[in-house]
Amino acid sequence: MKRNSSIRREKIAEALGRTRSHPTAEWIYDQVKQEIPDLSLGTVYRNLKILVEEGRARVIHAEDGKDHFDAHVEAHHHLICKQCGKVVDYYTSEETGLAQRIETDTGFLIDSDGLKLSGFCKDCKPKA
Amino acid sequence: MKRNSSIRREKIAEALGRTRSHPTAEWIYDQVKQEIPDLSLGTVYRNLKILVEEGRARVIHAEDGKDHFDAHVEAHHHLICKQCGKVVDYYTSEETGLAQRIETDTGFLIDSDGLKLSGFCKDCKPKA
DNA sequence: TTAATAATAAGAATCGTTATCAATTTTATA
DNA sequence: TATAAAATTGATAACGATTCTTATTATTAA
């Protein structure tokens, strides 16, 4: 299936690439709509899905029930705050030992970007 | 707020406790309905929520967009298959070093049960 | 140009979940 | 006991996020 890349799709990809905030479809819609006023939310969803299929973006199923998107596809992990829903990048290679052990133990092949760690972020952490 | 524990709630907790398969509300509904035919799905959701509040169950927001429940609340982690959606328990304390380093690095406080690792399970793993 | 394909907006439909509500059951208290 | 208050329920409406449908327009290929 040949696939063109439409102007809208590229604008969506750009908006997503411009931020490190792991936005939702809605946020991207609001952004791109400023440039393309007749953009529809369905188009955003459809194109985000295509970008993910093409490996140009990742989805994070966050704790807030919404899908968050990330154009930074290099291996890194995500810290997800249970309280405010914030998603923060975390880069480390320290988990490779863990991933290897898991594969030996269970047969599960862990993605190099498959770590999601939930807890409480700096701001939401109960002060001691 | 004093809280009684109804028969239905206990049956729901039992059904959940009986399995290690991290079922959805729907699955639990189907199970308990065999014993209590006039059970309603809303009751299942309502009671699962209460069980989670009481610390008698955990929720896992899985990759399939559904909430999965787990009555085994001792610290353990979850391996989630991207392909078939299966959720498998993983017990380790090896991540405490990682969790500690993350807290130092980022201020994020990682739950002792906050690890979700996604990848491919034994069966869905691309054969080499 | 013509025909086929791709992309679109708008909105309906679906899905998992939560909230509402009136009726019933359970518990507390007089 | 009686009776008021609180908890629980089934049914169903409502909800928010996402997907699907339809009709239309734009792009590409022949």
Image (cartoon, coloured by chain):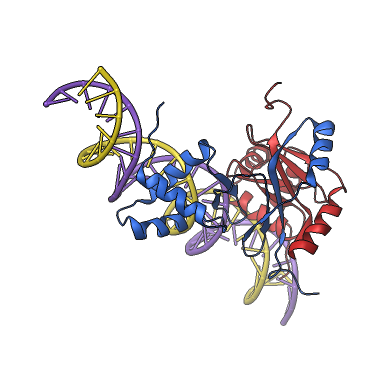
Chain colours: A blue, B red, C purple, D yellow
Give percent across and percent down for residue A114: 69, 43
Using the rendered image of the protein, determine whether residue B9 is visible from the camera's viewpoint: yes
Task: Say if A26 sits above or below A46 in the image.
Answer: below
Taking the image as shown, residue A42 lies to the left or right of residue D27, namely: right
Using the rendered image of the protein, determine whether residue B90 is visible from the camera's viewpoint: no
Image quadrant in which the N terminus of chain B is located: bottom right
Taking the image as shown, residue A77 lies to the left or right of residue A107, namely: left
Q: Residue at x 41, y 46 (%)?
A: A10
Foreground pick, B24 / B37 = B24
Quadrant position of residue B39: top right
Give percent across and percent down for residue B67: 63, 47
Give percent across and percent down for residue A111: 69, 38
Q: How many labels were placed on the picture? A: 0
Foreground pick, B28 / B115 = B115
Q: Residue at x 68, y 71 (%)?
A: A123
Task: Say if C2 sits above or below A36 in the image.
Answer: above
Q: Most extreme residue toward the right, as rendered?
A: B93
Give percent across and percent down for residue C30: 72, 82
Foreground pick, D18 / B72 = D18
Quadrant position of residue B17: top right
Image quadrant in which the C terminus of chain B is located: top right
